[in-house]
Image (cartoon, rainbow, N blue to C red):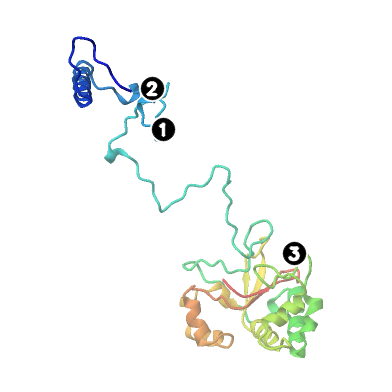
Amino acid sequence: MRISAPKGITSLPARAVLASALSVALITGAFALVSHPALALSEIKREDFPSHQTPMEPSDQPIEKETLPPVDQVPIPDSTTTPPADDEPDTPMVPDGTEPDGTAPDDGAQVDPNGPLPEVFYDLAKLPESVRTKHQAIIDACKTGDVEKLRPLLDTGENGTQLSFGGVDGDPIAYLKELSGDDGGQEILAILEEVLSAGYVHLDAGTPNDMYVWPYFIAIPLDRLTASQRVELFKIVTAGDYEDMKNYGSYIFYRVGITPEGKWSFFVAGD
């Protein structure tokens, strides 16, 4: 398009007109910058953003500032402990080998290391007749070499003869065979006979825990055994077993208990 100059004015070249227009625009922009302060980011209108960017929408809610405590006052959690969850009730731990009511089986193993030593007996004639009869019946069964002969002598049921601190699931005779080092159960019979051939003690006489217990080592701390008593001990255990028992301070091999009524209460090993 051609631009015609007004009458009376000499026509200017197109470049001169364009330069003049640019000068006016620059001067106008300069005055605009001076007369208006810089806009804050939240005051910039959407159309002021370049077309390839997305403007930030201002929030209607004021931003709340949180004052943080000093670094030296921030508690540091203890990584070594974990607090129990509120929905997990405390469950008391029950040791293995306890009775259904939560009490440990009384096999005469609780001995005061500094208490008076119990009297040791060897004379079977001093036993009540019911105890002496059961004692002899067990020995006779052992001498047969047939572990099945012990079955009629074992008490069954909830208060039956205890063969393990943790209880026995299944057939008690099969369990005794498993304890034996041989397939027929002769080793466990030999141990049972040897234990019943040792001296015995009468524990908790006149109480609900009244019991005749073999061997008497169960009631005497190892460090208080005499030299002759250690000879008797080595008839049942080896010297290596004896050294291991020193860590416990007491005899922890097999022991037998018979009540005054002649009930075979237990045949167990352990601490």
Judge depth for marks 3 and 2 and give the one in front.
Answer: 2
- Circles 1 and 2, Cβ within 8 Å, touching? The answer is no
Vertically, is 236 above or below 12?
Answer: below
Q: Nearer the viewer, residue 79 or 62?
A: 62
Expressed as whole percent of the image width and height from the top left, the position of residue 223 reads 46, 77
Quadrant in the picture for the C terminus? bottom right
Residue underneath mark 1: 54
SS for tag 1?
loop
Find the distance from the CA under tag 1 to the CA under tag 3: 83 Å
Q: Residue furthest right?
A: 152
Please name the amino acid that badge 2 sits on. Answer: Pro
- Tell me, for residue 159, which label it has, or none: 3
Please name the amino acid that badge 1 sits on. Answer: Thr
Q: Nearer the viewer, residue 62 or 37?
A: 37
Find the distance from the CA under tag 3 to the CA under tag 2: 76 Å
Name the residue located 73 percent from the left edge and 74 percent from the top edge. Answer: 131
Expressed as whole percent of the image width and height from the top left, the position of residue 67 reads 32, 30
SS for tag 3?
loop
Mark 1 and mark 2 lie on one chain; the one further toward the N terminus is: 1
Name the residue located 38 percent from the left edge and 22 percent from the top edge. Answer: 62
Q: Is residue 151 visible?
A: yes
